[in-house]
Amino acid sequence: MNFYFLIIIFIILYIMLSRKELYLEILNKKRRKRKMPQELMKEFIGKVCSIMLFNNSFGVQGRIVAVEENWIKVDEKNKIRIINGDMIQDISILPEKYQK
């Protein structure tokens, strides 16, 4: 009887430990950040763009000056902004008349 009780305890402990590892793996996947595609962003450098952000109901309009890792440097009319790439929803190049 004691032998079966010990086997059941070991099985329960094994299941609990494997579930904990699975849970930690799921958490780590959620924590991984997506990186912006550098190759695609290089096309936008030097152009006036409209950038829509997730946390704002409005966007940012300005010339993209630089892209480093997950950050974009944007030159607006009177100021320079640095935008986190994780917060960007959409980027579009404005028409030629705005590219001056």
Image: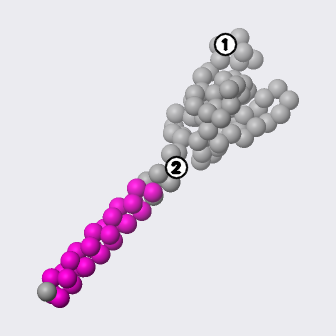
- Frontmost residue, 62 versus 47: 62
Position of residue 63 measured from the top left corner of the image (x, y, whole percent): 72, 28
Q: What's under tag 1, amino acid-wise?
A: Glu
Label 2 – label 1 distance at C-alpha: 34 Å
Residue placed farthest to the bottom in the image?
2
Residue at horizontal 58 percent and vertical 28 percent from the top: 90
- As drawn, is 8 to the left or to the right of 16? left
Q: Are marks 2 and 1 in contact (CB under 8 Å)?
A: no
* Residue segment shown in magenta: 2-27
Position of residue 15 measured from the top left corner of the image (x, y, whole percent): 27, 69
Quadrant that contains the N terminus: bottom left
- The image's mark for residue 33 is 2
Quarter occupied by residue 62? top right
Quarter occupied by residue 11? bottom left
Position of residue 61 measured from the top left corner of the image (x, y, whole percent): 72, 25
- Frontmost residue, 32 versus 57: 57
Position of residue 23 measured from the top left corner of the image (x, y, whole percent): 39, 60
Magenta part, dominant SS:
helix
- Frontmost residue, 86 versus 48: 86
Asked if residue 47 shows in the view, the reply is: no
Asked if residue 100 is positioned above or below residue 33 in the image, the reply reads above
Residue at horizontal 68 percent and vertical 26 percent from the top: 57
Residue placed farthest to the top in the image?
97
Residue at horizontal 57 percent and vertical 34 percent from the top: 41
Asked if residue 86 shows in the view, the reply is: yes
Q: Judge the density around disc 1: few (<14), some (14-19), many (≥20) Cα neighbours within 10 Å.
A: few
Q: Nearer the viewer, mark 2 or mark 1?
A: 2
Residue at horizontal 66 percent and vertical 13 percent from the top: 96
Q: What's under tag 2, amino acid-wise?
A: Lys
Asked if residue 60 is positioned above or below residue 33 in the image, the reply reads above
Q: From the image, tell me which residue sits under label 1.
A: 96
Going from the N terminus, do you reach mark 2 or mark 1 first? 2
